[in-house]
Amino acid sequence: MRGLAAVAAFAIALPLTASAQSTDPDVALERTVRDDDRGVRAVIRYRPEVPFGGQDEIENEDGTVTVIHWDGFTGQFTAEVIEGDLAEDDAEAFLREAVIAVCPSVDRDRLETEWVRAWPPIYSIYSQCPEVDERLD
């Protein structure tokens, strides 16, 4: 419940500006957000289909290991900080809260467990925005 309260405060304290026009054709949603408490302004971009992949190891009954490689497509949100700086411990919370502010329909359970990739000033996380995805279908 504590996380939900933080998200509500972020969304209220964070007015969204008009949608910026992205030059990237893969971007389905782009918003500029501001978090006055952290002194940060960022552009949040949502791409509904980015390639991703990984591998899993399965131990067989005979002790050998089988490696399965997989790939697919998923949604991704990125935040590009354009004003201010994020402390390392604030970056993950900022990104998750900003995603909820720009996409209230995001699957919050998945968002909470996904790993945040950080290359300051750019941060990204995999998740879908159903309200945008439905408009694209």
Image: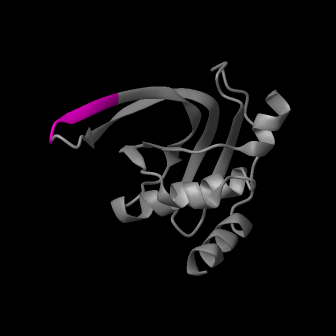
Question: What residue is shown at x 74% (from left), y 52% (from top)?
Answer: 16
Residue 17: horizontal and vertical position, in percent? 76, 47
Q: Nearer the viewer, residue 62 or 72?
A: 62
Q: Main secondary structure of the magenta part?
A: strand
Residue 57: horizontal and vertical position, in percent? 27, 39
Residue 86: horizontal and vertical position, in percent? 42, 57
Q: On the image, which quarter does residue 20 sit in?
A: top right
Q: Is residue 79 above or below residue 95?
A: above
Q: Nearer the viewer, residue 125 or 23?
A: 125
Q: Which residues are magenta?
A: 63-68
Question: What residue is shown at x 59% (from left), y 61% (from top)?
Answer: 109
113 sits to left or right of 17: left
Q: Considering the image in quadrants, where does the N terminus appear?
A: bottom right
Question: What residue is shown at x 37% (from left), y 33% (from top)?
Answer: 54
73 sits to left or right of 122: right
Display colour scheme? one colour
